[in-house]
Image (tube, coloured by chain):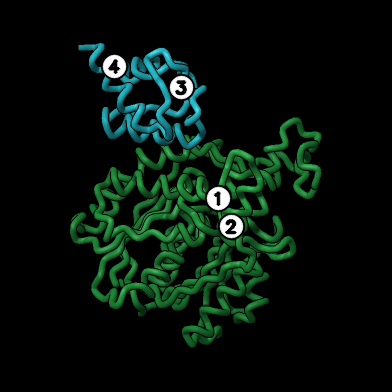
Amino acid sequence: METNELEIFIENFKSLLLSDENVNSKTDFKQLESWDSLFILELIMMIDEKYEKKITPTTILDSTTINDLFNEIKSI
Amino acid sequence: MIKTFIKCISFHLPQNEVTNDYLSTLSPNWTSDKIYSKIGIERRFITNENEFASDIAVKSANKLFVDNNIDPNEIDFLIYCTQSPDYLLPTTACIIQNTLGLKKSIGAIDFNLGCSGYVYGLSIAKGLIQSGSAKNVLLITSETYSKFLKSDDISNRSIFGDAATSTLISTSGIAEIKDFVFGTDGSGAKNLNLKYGGIKYNNNFNYNNKNEDDFGSGNSNENYLYMNGAEIFSFTLFSIPEIVQNILKKNNITFNEIDYFVFHQASKMVLDALRKKININEDKFFTNIKNYGNTVSSTIPIALSDLTKQSNDLSNKKILITGFGVGYSWSGTILQF
């Protein structure tokens, strides 16, 4: 169940990318080509819309991998 | 209770157009198309080096008088909203009174608010009229954030534009000003500020030093406008939906009764996110940020002016307006056309 939720989160994350970048749970998302200051806003919006959770910009900046982000959302 | 109305609105844009083509020359990572697709702004206008907020304020007021056949002698109170005052003192509103040739028997005040400023100005004007202190209040908003930005700060230069607006508030007019909701959270002060230039860090201020990378202050950014866009976005996305509900409650009006929502034109992303979250129909959500950028306290009156021109007939329409941002500070009301 947990794995499935993570896969869905990765799919939701991928929908924000500008190009078809290869990502998995261990991807350091701040190294992605799509990453910039506006990408943080996209992430906040997506997490609010899909998970009804309020993630702070600091939490995003303090996270490294997509899995970290997923765990943060689960813990909110 | 005396009813108060917006009688007329005019605005003035400085002549220098900042295009996305120009902005793209500031950074190799940006193209004109990328700026438009990400920011949603086509153009903004900025003042000359020797043109100040008070100059464009005066132009917007003179336009208001001419376009609407207003006798300046009828003005009995001037309220000036700016974060770009000419001096720490005197009050810029006093200088504007003289430049516009307004009567000496009027009251004139400045107040320092940004994106929430117009709505606060309407509330002050309403209070003055309802208390019998004034009959015709001239509310001017004017901002020149372009002067606070580093020349290569493409993020903020792509968002902010300079502008001035003038609104006459009186006992009759086109739209009745209904009840207000206010809010303040100074814990957000650090996320949008200009640290130097006031008194607290007066000794560090070196705004006119053109050598932008060597201010001797240790952090050149503190001479310029700092905005933590992600924090401001987060504040907006998670606060404004509730504020909209509070404005409706305060005025005993339902969501569906609102004909138009005119929000502070902060950025395309903020506006899109709020519209979606609050579930506002696109037809009811007025935006014009594409044409002017974020002009701080002037976005709402410019939007109201454009909406008035674009709509054949606004009579009997209810418009919800809300301003929010630097402070943090926010406010909203209903305009009954």
Q: Which amino acid does the dot numbered 3 rest on? A: Phe
Quadrant of image for the C terminus of chain B: bottom left
Q: Chain of mark 3?
A: A
Which label was assigned to residue B32?
A: 1
Q: Which amino acid does the dot numbered 4 rest on? A: Leu
Residue B179 in view (yes/no): no
Q: Nearer the viewer, residue B236 or A48?
A: A48
The residue positioned 61% from the left and 48% from the top of the image is B24
For this view, does B140 lie left or right of residue B320?
A: right
Instruction: Tell me the crowding category of disc 3: few under 14, some 14 to 19, or many 20 or more residues within 10 angstroms, Cα based.
Output: many
Q: Secondary structure at mark 4?
A: helix
Q: Are marks 4 and 1 on the same chain?
A: no
Dot 2 and dot 1 residues touching (CB under 8 Å): yes
Q: Chain of mark 1?
A: B
Disc 2 versus disc 4: distance between alpha carbons? 42 Å
Give residue B169's position: percent from left, percent from top.
43, 73
For the residues carrying marks 1 and 3, which lies nearer the camera in this image? 1
Q: Which amino acid does the dot numbered 1 rest on? A: Ser
**What colour has chain B?**
green
Dot 1 and dot 3 residues touching (CB under 8 Å): no
Q: Which quarter of the picture shows residue B85? A: bottom right
Q: Are marks 3 and 4 on the same chain?
A: yes
Sequence-first tag of 3 and 4: 4
Q: Note whether A76 is above or below B296 in the view shown.
A: above
Q: Which chain is cyan?
A: A
The residue positioned 56% from the left and 36% from the top of the image is B190
Q: Which residue is mark 3?
A: A29
Dot 2 and dot 4 residues touching (CB under 8 Å): no
Q: Are marks 2 and 1 on the same chain?
A: yes
Q: Which residue is mark 2?
A: B19
Q: Which residue is mark 4?
A: A6
Q: Nearer the viewer, residue B17 or B169?
A: B17
